[in-house]
Image (cartoon, rainbow, N blue to C red):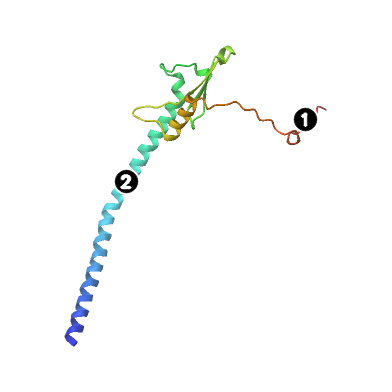
Amino acid sequence: MVNIILQIVGFLLIILAGFILGIIIANQYWKIKLPKLIKKERENAVKKSREVLSGQFSEQLAPFLPDFKYSPSEARFIGKPVDFIVFKGMDQKDINEIVFVEVKSGSSTLSMQEKKLSEIVKDKKIKWEEYRIPEGLVKKIKKP
């Protein structure tokens, strides 16, 4: 009976020693690995941030680039869900077409929302609506 108890205690001590040793090894591993991992993740975050900012900057410059098909003064930057709305003919005070323009660079592709917007435009599911502010909400300014 004493022999069995000693074996159980010995076994538990071995498990405890293994557990403590595992904690020590894991702690040392992460002391070495974690700073490298953090540095790599920060570098990735900075790189992605620069890419996003570069893309946004490029989007807003697009009307002034040589291959842009429309007059920069007729293009209005929206950003989301589409980059530009172009009012063709606006310079001559004769708007004859409205064009939605999404700017992409490199190998980027349309998002699901951009694809959906493209389908809506192609299907001509577009309408004009006028909204009038209720008279009671408009404060009338009286001249002295």
Density class for disc 1 (Cα within 10 Å; few <14, some 14-19, many ≥20) is few
What residue sits right under mark 1 in the picture?
141
In the image: residue 133, left or right of residue 67: right
Above/below status of 15 relative to 113: below
What residue sits right under mark 2 in the picture?
39
Which residue appears farthest toward the top when viewing the image? 92
* Residue 97 position within the rendered picture, expressed as x and y whole percent measured from the top left: 53, 17
Quick one: 129 or 85, which is closer to the camera?
Answer: 129
Quick one: 80 or 130, which is closer to the camera?
Answer: 130
Quick one: 123 or 11, which is closer to the camera?
Answer: 123
Quadrant of the rendered image containing residue 67: top left
* Residue 84 position within the rendered picture, expressed as x and y whole percent measured from the top left: 49, 25
Density class for disc 2 (Cα within 10 Å; few <14, some 14-19, many ≥20) is few
Name the residue located 18 percent from the left edge and 83 percent from the top edge: 4
* Quadrant of the rendering where the N terminus is positioned: bottom left
Name the residue located 48 percent from the left edge and 26 percent from the top edge: 123
Real-space Cα distance between discs 2 and 1? 60 Å
